Image (cartoon, grey):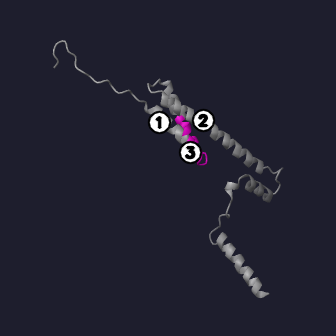
């Protein structure tokens, strides 16, 4: 109950924050950081771009996170697409049979162009000798050959 001539005090409402804009910002930054992990950041960046665009189209009151999210997401998608194109063009060049006619030369190209993807050994079938067993078998064969001589 208020006295006549007086108004009750109502504190101002807190500013509304857009969940879509915040999600877009978080996913955009995560997309940029996720590019280090084998381009895994492209998926959150794509989702962040969509959420940020929806938030901007809706004209939500908190626009700054949506703009940051769209910018980071677009940057992550551009960098990711560029590096994916670059890696695939290098792989296609190594797979060209006109340039590298046999398997050994193609394998050499892959090992030269992608030094971070060195293959340790081929997966062995059950019951076959693995890489460690092959090494010990070579050593055993070499020692038995020297013993026979």
Q: Which residue is mark 3?
A: 34
Q: Quick one: quadrant of the C terminus? A: bottom right
Residue drawn at x 77%, y 87% is 148
**Which of the 4 image quarters holds residue 7?**
top left
Magenta stretch holds residue 43 = yes
Q: Is residue 127 above or below residue 40?
A: below
Sequence-wise, the earlier of marks 3 and 1 is 1
Residue at point 73%, 82% (across, down): 143
Residue identifier under label 2: 75
- Residue 23 numbered tag: 1
Instruction: From this view, report whether residue 37 is shown above or below residue 57.
Output: below
Secondary structure, mark 2, is helix
Disc on res. 107: none
Position of residue 70 measured from the top left corner of the image (x, y, whole percent): 54, 32
Which of label 2 and label 1 is nearer to you?
Answer: 2
Q: CA distance from mark 2 to mark 3?
A: 12 Å
In the picture provided, is 63 more to the left or to the right than 124?
A: left
The answer to whether residue 147 is magenta is no
């Amino acid at each position: 109950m208020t006295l006549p001539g007086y108004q009750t005090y109502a504190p101002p409402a807190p500013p509304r924050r857009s969940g879509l804009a915040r999600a877009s910002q978080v996913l955009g930054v995560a997309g940029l950081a996720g590019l280090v992990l084998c381009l895994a950041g492209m998926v959150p960046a794509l989702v962040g771009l969509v959420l940020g665009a929806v938030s901007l189209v809706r004209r939500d009151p908190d626009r700054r996170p949506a703009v940051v999210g769209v910018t980071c997401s677009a940057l992550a998608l551009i960098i990711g697409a560029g590096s994916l194109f670059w890696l695939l063009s290098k792989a296609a060049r190594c797979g060209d049979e006109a340039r590298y006619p046999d398997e050994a030369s193609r394998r050499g190209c892959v090992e030269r162009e992608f030094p971070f993807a060195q293959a340790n050994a081929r997966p062995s079938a059950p019951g076959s000798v693995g890489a460690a067993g092959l090494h010990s078998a070579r050593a055993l064969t070499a020692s038995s050959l020297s013993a026979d001589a």
